[in-house]
Image (spheres, rainbow, N blue to C red):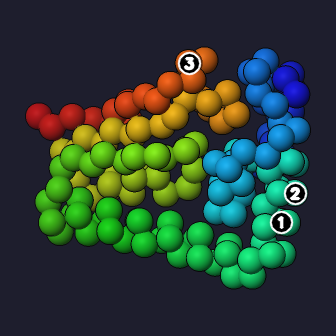
Amino acid sequence: MAGEHVAASGEQRALPAELDTTVAHPARVYDYWLGGKDNFAADREAAERVLEATPGLRMRVRANRAFLARVVRFLAGEAGIRQFLDIGTGIPTANNTHEVAAPSTTCRRICASRRRSSQAPRAPSNSSGPSLSCCSGSCT
């Protein structure tokens, strides 16, 4: 449960007292499928069980993330969109909306709606309600 833990990346890190790493969490399972580092043994085991029952799922999950990146790059770059609202983002992982939009424009505002959860390794608070936080920048 809580204490020190070695993440999938091999990095040692402290965990919040309420974080139960013995129970898989959907956001961390998705992170594992994407090749992220914010998952634990229970998440990886659950993810592998799902992959056994659903061949090709990892490829579809990664294709979904690649599609998100292409769309955000287009909207931020070519279409000139300067504000994004990312709803239901789970935990931060590779190619988040704000990371993809960053190189495309200097004027952007990206807000992410996350359900605050003690099961997410980088949960913003101990509250269990939804939150809206602006991850990056503002237009000047």
Question: Which residue is under mark 1?
Answer: 48
Circle 1: element type? helix
**On the rendered image, what quadrant is the N terminus found in?**
top right
Question: Which quadrant of the view contains residue 139?
Answer: top left
Nearest the eye: 57 or 105: 57
Name the residue: 83% across, 57% down.
Answer: 46
Name the residue: 75% across, 82% down.
Answer: 55
Question: Which quadrant of the view contains residue 136?
Answer: top left
Residue 19 to residue 102: above or below: above
Q: Could you tell me the amino acid type at mark 1?
A: Glu
Which percent across, then down, holds residue 86? 37, 48
Question: Which residue is under mark 3?
Answer: 127
Name the residue: 83% across, 41% down.
Answer: 23
Residue situated furthest bottom in the rendering: 55
**31 with respect to 77 (left or right):** right
Going from the N terminus, do you reach mark 1 or mark 3 first? 1
Circle 2: element type? helix
For disc 3, the neighbor class at 10 Å (few under 14, some 14 to 19, many from 20) is: few
